Image: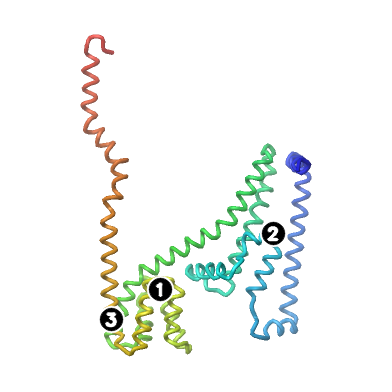
Amino acid sequence: MDNLMTMVNGWLQNPDPLRILFIVLAGSAILALGLGISSVLLATTDPLRRRLADSGPEKRADGRLLLMIQTIAGPVAAWVLPTTEVERSRVSKQLTYAGFRQPDALQAFYAIKVALMLVIPALVLVALQWFPAVSTAKVFGYLSLGVGFGLIAPSSVLERLMERRLRTLRQGFPDALDLLVVCVESGLGLSMAIQRVADEIGVSHPELARELALVNAEIRAGVDRTLALRNLADRTGLNDIRGLVSLLVQTMRFGTSVGDALRVYSEEFRDRRMQKAEEEAATIATKLIFPLVLCLFPSFFVVAIGPAVLRLITVFSQLPGGT
């Protein structure tokens, strides 16, 4: 270990080995890129490989891509790639809720993680060439921070995107529900009502409009209406939409009126919104305590007691022996 530390310190003090290492890494990266491009071109131009790739029901690029990422990452893959199907399913749901519904979204997410965990420490090593006075302990600390940032940053960004999209869908759902009730009560069928609502809210709430339009497109393509509605609940992840879908599925199963069911659900949803607003309003008094104590009360004390304090200082300064 001491020999390794001595060697690393010698590299940091002498930039020549670092230049050689950088040239070797750059050459290796260019060689790997050339091999990857050549293999892709060979696979796309070879008719035998194309037919083998397209034949059979097991045409899945996700497993192959994850295996390739695991091979490239090496020991880093154990900290990045999912080890169980439950973890993969959880991340896939998060990507779906965030709006990434491409087939290779999961693989691209983990590829970005691996790339950041490998690229950021390399950039740190290159940047430390201009700081030769940095100690070895700090170098390892910066490298650890770079690896941690590459591991945590994609998940944090994904959670922010998911929360923002869910908030956008939640804001547009009440308007869409009211329009759906009006369209169904005016005589439109459920599919036409969903399409009309998607057209009407396309400007104000484009995310929800696309989801509703996708439901109607699935129904037109031959997907069962119940399955299309359940796909809507799975894609959005909102409890409000999931409750609406459950209501519509039960209504279609038992043959009751869709308009009456939507009207009842709209009234209950409006009551829940009002109760939630009242609950948030009741917590305002508690939330205002800290701003009042920290911001308003000090200024109030200065205005109310400040003149009296100044007058007392003046009076005591005029007394015999005062300063």
Mark number, residue 208: 1
| Front in this rendered view, residue 2 or 209 | 2
- Label 1: element kind: helix
Identify residue type, mark 1: Leu
The CA span between labels 3 and 1 is: 18 Å
Q: Which residue lies at the image location 75% right of the left edge and 46% below the top edge?
A: 18
- Label 2: element kind: helix
- Label 3: element kind: helix
Residue of label 2: 75
Residue of label 3: 182
Q: Can you give x and y, in whole percent of width and height, for residue 227 in the image?
A: 45, 84
Q: Which residue lies at the image location 35% right of the left edge and 67% below the top edge?
A: 171
Q: Is residue 311 above or below residue 275?
A: above
Q: Which residue lies at the image location 23% right of the left edge and 33% below the top edge?
A: 303
Identify residue type, mark 3: Val
- Mark nearer the N terminus (2 vs 1): 2
Q: Quadrant of residue 28?
A: bottom right
Identify residue type, mark 2: Pro
The CA span between labels 2 and 1 is: 42 Å
Labelled pair 2, 1 in contact (Cβ < 8 Å) = no
Q: Residues within 10 Å of mark 1 (few under 14, many from 20)?
A: many
Q: Which residue lies at the image location 63% right of the left edge and 56% below the top edge?
A: 117
